Amino acid sequence: MKIHIETDRLLMRDLMDEDAHGMFAMDSDAEVHTFLGNKPISTLEESQKMIDSIKQQYIENGIGRWAVVEKRSGNFVGWSGFKFVTDVVNGRTQYYDLGYRFLRKYWGKGYASETAIASLNHGFGELGFEEIVGIADVANTASNTILQKVGLIKRNEFIYDGTLHNFYSLTKKEWQDIST
């Protein structure tokens, strides 16, 4: 088990097969998928396929979303971190997308902000990224608030899967300017 980031309350580590039940609990919840196309999963096998896909991203791209675990309880709370995007989204490709998704019972605890800040610091400070992107459905107030709170800058709005989204980014230089 490789731990990539440790915060005061959380560990961010590679996703493992053992996370399938936690992923299923999260991704089968219709409320979790409200701003994700309203397509919750319905089988444990779908969770395992997602984990396998992310593990393949670790191999192919050297990065992928990480499991988030509470240090105190050892509980799987969701995932956060980066995905290397190779599709064309909003006219862009080949970028690092910052994302997060948590089991509903862990919403409102500040975990998304905590992992997003830690991810930005790790991405720019340790991994040498030159830019980090974040995308959120314009109606997803919580996610938009978090992306702005951690310093990403809204660049434009665009249609993604038929829905209006905000496109945020932050360059390494902009991060250095706000981190000093």
Image (cartoon, rainbow, N blue to C red):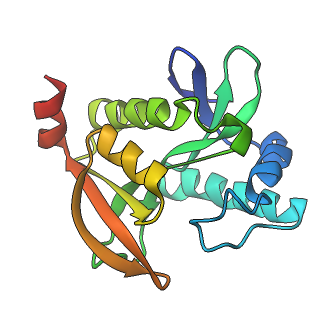
Taking the spot 67% from the left edge, 56% from the top edge, the residue there is 32
Foreground of the two, 34 or 61: 34
* Image quadrant in which the C terminus is located: top left
* Image quadrant in which the N terminus is located: top right
Q: Position of residue 131 (x, y in %)?
A: 24, 51
Taking the spot 38% from the left edge, 32% from the top edge, the residue there is 117
Q: Position of residue 129 (x, y in %)?
A: 28, 45
Q: Position of residue 159 (x, y in %)?
A: 38, 81
Horizontal side of residue 83 vs 133, given as left or right: right
Taking the spot 58% from the left edge, 29% from the top edge, the residue there is 109
Taking the spot 28% from the left edge, 58% from the top edge, the residue there is 168
Foreground of the two, 98 or 157: 157
Horizontal side of residue 88 vs 125, given as left or right: right
Residue 133 visible in the current orientation: yes
Q: Quadrant of residue 11?
A: top right
Q: Position of residue 113 (x, y in %)?
A: 45, 35
Residue 98 visible in the current orientation: no
Q: Is residue 72 above or below residue 88?
A: above
Q: Is residue 65 above or below residue 4?
A: below
Q: How many marks?
A: 0
Foreground of the two, 155 or 141: 141
